[in-house]
Image (tube, helix red, strand yellow):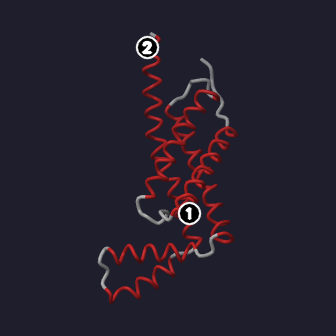
């Protein structure tokens, strides 16, 4: 039986590519005015899922020589997700600090408008706006984005790993 050493460098590369894809999607959504639409989160999740699946598949084929196990696929996907999140939050820090200084206020206004559309009472509006302005910070944005990429990434990696495991079983059965 051959033992395969887990190689980190290719995974980091895949994760950084995935992160740059997320940044490109984020910038595109922001420039088109749909970044703050709640459904835009699904675009990011779908892109993350595609990157994890494609990256895990590439890693399994080219680095592990086709010998992907559930655990190696899970770990590969999790590493890709963490690297993706790190690239994205680095982008958050740079873009909010230097490129889009009004981003946090835009975020506050979008959430405030969403709450108003849901029928927020006029007497609560001033307090809601003040609370949103206090709570919407770069630190919080970075923490929530990183934790979101990691949480969704682990779930997506677990699902992807199941698919790779099932595929490996079908291939093994077909060879028998």
The picture places residue 126, in percent across and down from the top left corner, at 41, 88
Residue 135 located left or right of residue 27: left
The label shown at residue 31 is 1
Residue denoted by label 2: 174
Q: 120 or 137, which is in the foreground? A: 120
Q: Helix, strand or loop at disc 1?
A: helix
Point 61% across, 24% down: residue: 65
Which residue extends farthest top?
176
Look at the picture and state if 38 lies above or below 172.
Answer: below
Which residue extends farthest front?
32
Point 57% across, 38% down: residue: 55
Mark 2 Cα-neighbour bin, 10 Å: few <14, some 14–19, many ≥20: few
Q: 4 or 32, which is in the foreground? A: 32
Look at the picture and state if 92 lies above or below 110.
Answer: above
The picture places residue 69, in percent across and down from the top left corner, at 52, 29
The picture places residue 78, in percent across and down from the top left corner, at 55, 45
Q: 113 or 13, which is in the foreground? A: 113
């Amino acid at each position: 039986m051959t033992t395969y050493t887990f190689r980190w460098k290719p995974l980091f590369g895949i994760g950084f590519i995935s992160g740059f894809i997320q940044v490109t999607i984020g910038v595109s959504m922001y420039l088109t005015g749909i970044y703050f639409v709640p459904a835009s989160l699904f675009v990011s999740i779908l892109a993350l899922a595609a990157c994890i699946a494609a990256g895990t598949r590439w890693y399994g084929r080219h680095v592990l020589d086709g010998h992907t196990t559930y655990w190696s696929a899970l770990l590969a996907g999790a590493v890709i997700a963490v690297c993706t999140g790190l690239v994205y939050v680095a982008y958050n820090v740079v873009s909010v600090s230097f490129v889009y200084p009004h981003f946090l206020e835009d975020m506050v206004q979008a959430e405030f408008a969403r709450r108003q559309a849901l029928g927020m009472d006029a007497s609560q509006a001033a307090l809601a706006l003040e609370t949103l302005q206090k709570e919407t910070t770069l630190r919080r944005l970075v923490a929530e984005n990183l934790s979101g990429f990691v949480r969704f990434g682990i779930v997506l990696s677990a699902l992807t790993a199941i698919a790779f495991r099932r595929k490996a079983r079908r291939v093994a059965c077909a060879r028998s």
